[in-house]
Amino acid sequence: MPRQHRVSNLILTRRQVAGGAAIAGAGLVVGRGPVSARQDGTPAPATPAGTPVGGNLTVYCGRNEELVGGLVPDIEAATGITLDMRYGNTAELAAQILEEGDNTPAGLYFGQDAGSLGALAAGGVLAPIPAETLELVEPSFRSADDLWVGVSGRVRTLVYNTEITDPATLPASILDLPSADLGGPIGWAPTNASFQSFVTALRVTEGEDVARQWLEDMVAAGAVTFEGNGAQLQAVAAQEIAVGLVNHYYLYEARMETPEIPVENYYFAGGDLGSLINVAGVGIIAGSGQEAQAEAVTAYLLGNEAQTYFSEVTSEYPLAAGIPAVEELVPLADLQAPDIDLSDLADLEGTLALLTEVGLI
């Protein structure tokens, strides 16, 4: 069946972070060593040791090369697959796959948010992921129709300066942020993928009118626009803005260079949308002729080695393999995150239309 050809003007900025060398350690899901555990603790099937898959795989990767490039040599060594990594903007790469249709060279899509993965699923270009791989991740972090799976998690937070802000004075809900007395301006990044996924979630849960009003109220409150999250955090540290809307891991990246940086994450409680948990994840391109390779790489990304990498190098939440998050992070189980199906975040086009209407992109 021909793929649907849809082109969306999805303009998101990439996360700019410094990565590190891959973590060597526990066994791999594919190619050698022990296997991972499913969520119920039972071993997950894997390609038998000594029988790598081999072949070639083109990966359209919306994650920054500095962030995930350290994993590439290990994936190739474990699976025997030669990877052609094509890095770019998460949403633009998703739109490119939809535009290329049956002619896309991509065999695997690696995106930084569930919204772009959902857009590909809705476009009919993704193949089902094998059950033994999906079962490594709990249902809330994968698509209901088995077409994509999260490999690492991140939480939306509000960063504040500990030297000038008492967290008790911060609003209980992100909906009240525009009217809060913060002692300074709010920072945000409207072109950032994670922020746009939040806006999509706001539209889904509260409706189009509430989302539009919140955005307009933020503009009226003098919110300061940044290109990304890291710059917001540094502006909070410098007391140039009072707070900033970012993902949780930017704080831990900043602490690697400046351990005493006077910034902390504030998590909205009570299931508030401000603490949305999103995922970076992968989808296998249907009809590419590279399905076996894509399945093997997907399994690797959910194995012990890659999950440890996401935990210890990028300070994200591992989503499989029993690998714990770094101890500085609030455990996922303790976060009072909103109850939202990540598959419902697929309408990025509607979000971009709203942001354009409000004058933010």
Image (cartoon, rainbow, N blue to C red):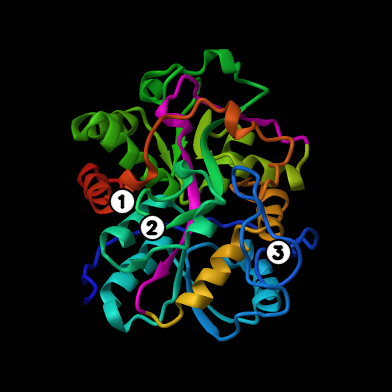
The dot on residue 117 is: 2
User: Mark 1 and mark 2 in contact (Cβ < 8 Å)?
Assistant: yes
Front-most of residues 33 and 278:
33
The dot on residue 28 is: 3
- The residue identified by callout 1 is 346
Front-most of residues 165 and 266:
266
Percent across and percent down for residue 271 are 44, 24
In this picture, residue 72 sits left or right of residue 197? right
Q: Calculate the distance from the C-alpha at mark 1 to the C-alpha at mark 3.
A: 31 Å
> Mark 1: which amino acid?
Ala
> Mark 2: which amino acid?
Leu
Q: Nearer the viewer, mark 2 or mark 3?
A: 3
Q: Is residue 33 above or below residue 132?
A: below
Q: Calculate the distance from the C-alpha at mark 2 to the C-alpha at mark 3.
A: 25 Å
Q: From which residue to which does the magenta span run? A: 260-287
> Mark 3: which amino acid?
Leu
Percent across and percent down for residue 209 are 19, 31
Percent across and percent down for residue 185 are 46, 29
